[in-house]
Amino acid sequence: MRDYALEREIETLLGLRERREKDSELYKIANEVFDRTTKETLAYLHRRGAIENLYGVISTGKEANVFAGVDREGERVAVKVYRTYTTEFRRIWEYLAADPRVGYLPKDMRKLVFVWTRREFKNLQRAIKYAVRAPEPLIFRNNVLVMEFVGDDLPAPRLKDVEKELEKSDFEELYSYLMRVIERLWKRGDMVHGDLSEYNVLIWDEPVIIDWSQATVRRNRMSLELLKRDLRNVINYFARKGIAVDDYDEKLRELIEG
């Protein structure tokens, strides 16, 4: 049975009555992604004041979509909405099953995504605790995560999107910064990002690392492979930009034995 009150609340949150033509992309994605669980979750966060309006799409993916919004106080927020049914089920299950912080895993995909969302919230908190610049997590519920918006009128661009505009000195600074991030996370935070690349670095006042859903702790049996992935991604990318980079094997040994 259709819940017209819920539909009206979602229309208000999205501003669809006033902006349906203007924000056709938002309207289309909302209809594709927002199942009843997602709508109820967004309505709950709307009533809490965490999301007053969503007004644009920042990114789309197989696993989640990220929207730009504002809270009740008019502050910009980024809202990550995980798909409650996704083709990434096997990958999500494997990551969660290997994480010693996660206990019982539900067999229901929707509830598994809820665990995945909570895990990213905790990962963001942990990264910030150890002085890594990441979006501040504000609140989460079910499959929706509300975070700090990084940018001004527009979202901050990814490194991949602005690499042609950067000088060699910019790449050198970024390389040093990202290697410090890997080391700080591993040695001080006992964790690893696991998907660090030019696609997950925002260029702002200082670089901001995003997409922490796959990050985990060193106690995870997968952590060493994820550390190797991060090192390879960063070293190979900056080597292609003509930057003098560390020897991969030596750097890996230094991190593991240090």
Image (cartoon, grey):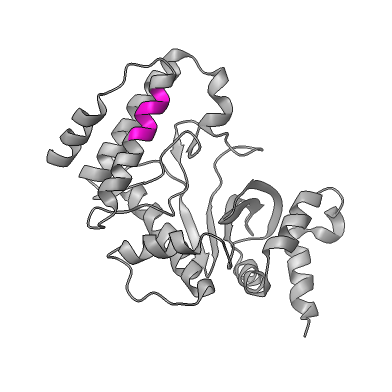
Quadrant where the image shows the N terminus: bottom right
Number of labels in the image equals 0
**Residue 88 place in picture, x, y as percent:** 51, 59
**Up-down relation of residue 234 to residue 138 (above or below):** above
- Classify residue 206 as left or right of residue 231: right
Residue found at x 47% / y 33%: 198
**Up-down relation of residue 151 to residue 50 (above or below):** above
Q: Quadrant of residue 131?
A: top left
**Residue 5 place in picture, x, y as percent:** 77, 78
Q: Is residue 54 visible?
A: yes
Q: Nearer the viewer, residue 10 or 251?
A: 251
**Up-down relation of residue 248 to residue 77 (above or below):** above
- Classify residue 133 as left or right of residue 103: right
Residue found at x 54% / y 58%: 146
- Classify residue 182 as left or right of residue 48: left
| Secondary structure mainly formed by the magenta segment | helix
Q: Quadrant of residue 94?
A: bottom left
Residue found at x 77% / y 64%: 12
In the picture as drawn, the residue positioned furthest to the bottom comes out as 1
Residue found at x 57% / y 63%: 86
Quadrant where the image shows the C terminus: top left
- Asked if the magenta segment contains residue 67, the reply would be no
**Residue 151 place in picture, x, y as percent:** 58, 38
**Up-down relation of residue 190 to residue 39 (above or below):** above
**Residue 169 place in picture, x, y as percent:** 42, 14
What span is colored magenta in the figure? 232-238
- Classify residue 135 as left or right of residue 184: right
Q: Is residue 74 visible?
A: no
Q: Nearer the viewer, residue 44 or 186?
A: 186
